[in-house]
Structure formats: structure tokens, C-alpha cells
Image (cartoon, helix red, strand yellow):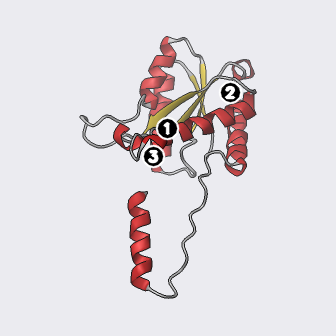
Amino acid sequence: CRQYRNDLEQARRVAGVGAPELVKLRHFFDHPGFIEPLADSVRAALSLLPEEHRETARLVFTAHSIPVAMNDASGPERDGLYERQQRETARLVTESVRGPGAGFDLVWQSRSGPPQVPWLEPDIVEHIAALAAQRIHAIVVAPSGFVSDHIEVRWDLDVEARAAAEAHGILFARAAT
């Protein structure tokens, strides 16, 4: 993100007088206009599960994993900012759907890069195996770190995560973006 902002500012300098003004919008991770539709989508996904599993289904939120160093970069006030924002989105949605203090999981997907570089964990597929070990019978997966369905959401969740859940005998529903 920093590189994008630097490149845009450089382009404005090159363009000179009359260059378009660039206005950075506020982060939307906690904006009601993002939280409310996501909560609606989680409710819709819950309704796809058999009624006897809706109240106990685990809410599992996903976002794109990033290197741990990137999450912890930019000084003390920003340490872990990305993860904190993703966690707050999940908390707000869960609170809207199930009330204050209700539990949820935050996991990651779409890891790439060299295996020796640590990325945020756990991965969604690994987490599903852990949920099976805890005898969880149903999950709703909400790709809260994404604003549209695209190849990473569709492949990572609709194919890989769903297959992992089915292999472990866990009922699976995915909230739409």
C-alpha cells in the first residue's frame, strides 16, 4: 500500500498543476456499510445449514494471509494492524449475528511465497482439521478480508476448504462476499 501511495504522489508531481486531487478513504473494516452486509451474508449462510446445527456452527472468518513481517511493520502503533483490523471485523459481524461475546475464529488463506518466510497462520484448511479434532460439526466460513468473489475465494474456500470439511465430516456453508 505504501508503494502505491508513493507512486501516486510521484505521478501527481510529474503531472504538475491541475493534477487530480487524491483523497484516501477511511479504512472500512469497521464501517457499518461493510459490517451489516457481511453479517447478513453470514446469517444467509447459517440458514443453509440444517436447523439443528445453526446455533452451534462455528463462525470462521478468513482474510488473505500476509508475511508476519509485513503485519508487524511500520512502527509500534501499527504493529499487527492488519490482523487487528481483520479480528475487529470478525468480532463486529459475530456480535451482530450472535450477540456480544460470542466466539469466532480468524484464519488465513492464499499464502504464497517462499516456505521459509513466516506468514500469518493458521491456514483455513489446517484449521478445519483442528476443528474436526475438537468435534465441531458445522462451520460457516466468511471471507471477511475480501470484497468480491474471485479465484482465491472460490478456489481456497469453495474447493479446498469445502473438501477439507467434507473429508472431516463437517457441514460447510460459505458466506457470500
Q: Is residue 18 above or below residue 161?
A: below
| First reached walking from the N terminus: tag 2 or tag 3 | 2
- The residue under label 3 is which amino acid type? Glu
**Label 3: which residue?**
152
Label 2 and label 3: CA atoms lie apart by 24 Å
**Label 1: which residue?**
83
Residue that appears at 48% across and 12% down: 133
Q: Give coordinates of residue 39: x percent, y percent.
A: 70, 39
Name, please, the residue furthest toward the front: 76
Q: Label 3, secondary structure: give it.
A: helix
| First reached walking from the N terminus: tag 3 or tag 1 | 1
Tell me if I can see residue 64 in this picture. no
- Between 157 and 38, the one lying in front of the other is 38
Residue 10, image quadrant: bottom left
What mark, if any, has residue 49 been given in the picture? Answer: 2
Label 3 and label 1: CA atoms lie apart by 19 Å
Q: Do labels 3 and 1 touch, CB within 8 Å?
A: no
